[in-house]
Amino acid sequence: MINHHFEFPKQEHLCSKALITDLFEKGESLISYPIRAVWNVIPSEDDYPVKVVMSVSKKKFKHAVDRNRAKRLLRESYRLNKEPLQKLAVAGRFTIHIAFIWLSTEPVAFSRIEKKMKGALSKIEVRISSMKYTDVNL
């Protein structure tokens, strides 16, 4: 039996420029250094309840190798810890769009990134739960 909970397929990536622009204009944010998370709750129900985009600025890391590694760490830590947020979105029948932005100018160990990602995802989950998005009447 294959466990599909830990996959991160292309359909979970937020690729639309219009949706990303909307996310940054209307979304809420929090910082769990070295990660900044911006999220927006959409009342529509999608096949994939949470869609994500990862960003690492060229100002933070000049070399593409370093930027790619930082994005890889963000993706992996999200992939391993996304399930509670997905369950919340499925139960509430809405879609959550999230952008994770790297803030540090130094490389960070995976263990620290994973710890901060867990913290950010749990904070997002608490804020969404407390704002009663589950009513779908946004």
Image (cartoon, rainbow, N blue to C red):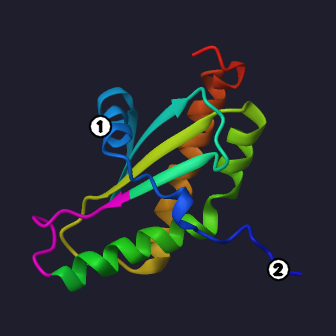
Residue beneath the point at 34% across and 32% down: 22
Residue found at the very far right of the displayed protein:
1
Q: Is residue 77 magenta?
A: no
**Residue 124 image-quadrant placement:** top right
Q: Is residue 59 magenta?
A: yes
| Count of number-bearing discs | 2
Q: In this view, does 88 lie above or below 99?
A: above
Residue 21: which disc?
1
Dot 1 or dot 2: first in sequence order is 2
Indicate the secondary structure of the residue bearing disc 1.
helix
Query: In this picture, which residue range is highlighted in magenta?
Result: 54-63
Q: Nearer the viewer, residue 87 or 121?
A: 87
Residue 2: which disc?
2
Residue beneath the point at 43% across and 68% down: 74
**Residue 114 percent across, percent down from the top left:** 51, 69
**Residue 57 image-quadrant placement:** bottom left
Q: Is the magenta stretch mostly helix, strand or loop?
A: loop
Q: Residues within 10 Å of mark 2 (few under 14, many from 20)?
A: few
Q: Nearer the viewer, residue 123 or 98?
A: 98
**Residue 116 percent across, percent down from the top left:** 47, 61
Indicate the secondary structure of the residue bearing disc 2.
loop
Residue found at the very far top of the displayed protein:
137
